Amino acid sequence: MEEHPKKDLKAILKNITFRDDAKVMEQLVDQSLRVKTRMGRIRRKIAVMSGKGGVGKSMTTVNIALALARKGQRVGVLDVDLNGPCIPRMLGVSGRFVSIAEGAVPPLGPYDMKVASMDFFLQQADTPVRWSGPTELSPIWLGLMEMNVIREFLADIVWGELDYLVIDLPPGAAADKPPVIINFIPELDGAIIVTTPSEVAQMVVKKSVAYARDVSIRPLGLIENMSGGRCPKCNTHVAFFDGACDDLASDVGLPILGKIPFSLEVSRSCDQGKPLPADHSVSKAFDNIVKNMEDVLNFRKIMAEAL
């Protein structure tokens, strides 16, 4: 086996761009078949999204993956944020893809979970991922190029047999990314929606839930992040926002899978790439979130079989 050479986004795009329409179609069909084959070996695919940036979506993705792995599940994490990938940093994973005959094997993280991210292609930690090509290209063309990158990414990664693939969507779940994901992973089991008690965040997230349903992504439930915190001096609960997400959950017809309080230890854990211990209160909260998520998935499976 050999290490997959580091490439910038421009180099990747060069490999997937043809002037011959026949070759373009041939490549697209080949990649789509490979994606379908690889996704077929994964039991459940879960996306983590939010219509609002800055609500802790990537932190949630990481801790859901860790909670699943602690249960003995075989887990993969896919970082679809091409412009600001941070999942490897939060999990303390470094390295490069390893090339084998079947494709590229992603580096391993805690509990042997497989982690795939554009971050592994960067030459330096502060290297931007955005392609620095002609500035006259329209946003539509740039969006198509990113779509091609995501397709190639999914087609080349050798996940093997997994119980769960947890997919971290970009901040704000940009309008073009959910449809891309649902087209590439038609067997997507659903999405977890992350929000905070902020009224502004809830307003945007409510639209995100409606949009997810419009593009045939099934929301599984809400996670309320930054749900207050503990005063370091008196240990009493302190609310950071007015209200909570209960009314939002009722309005959109979704369960609240869990509420995560703000914790300086969680922040340090993500910054330092050192997962919280299993007996930490936040780890236990995510264990409960995973249990609730699986209850929703199993209920839907039972209902589908009954119908």
Image (cartoon, rainbow, N blue to C red):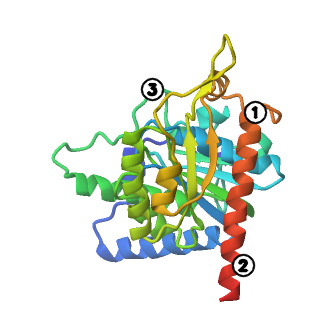
* Mark drawn on residue 281: 1
Q: Nearer the viewer, residue 59 or 246?
A: 246
Image position of 146 (left or right of 269): left
Residue ID at (43%, 71%): 28
Residue 291 horizontal/vertical position (percent): 75, 55
**Residue marked by disc 2:** 302
Q: How far is mark 3 from mark 1, CA to CA? A: 33 Å
Which quadrant: the C terminus? bottom right
Residue 12 horizontal/vertical position (percent): 42, 50
Among all residues in the image, which is located at the extreme bottom?
307
Q: Nearer the viewer, residue 10 or 200?
A: 200
Is any atom of residue 174 visible in this view?
yes
* Disc nearer the start of the sequence (2/3): 3
Q: Nearer the viewer, residue 11 or 185?
A: 185
Residue 93 horizontal/vertical position (percent): 66, 35
Q: How far is mark 2 from mark 3, CA to CA? A: 47 Å
**Residue marked by disc 3:** 126
Judge whether 254 appears above or below 81 on screen.
below
Q: Mark 2 or 3, which is nearer the eye?
A: 2
Q: Residues within 10 Å of mark 2 (few under 14, many from 20)?
A: few
Please tell me whether mark 1 sits on a helix, a strand or a loop.
helix
Judge whether 117 appears above or below 255 on screen.
above
* Disc nearer the start of the sequence (3/1): 3
Q: Quadrant of residue 213?
A: bottom left
Residue type at mark 1: give it.
Answer: Ser
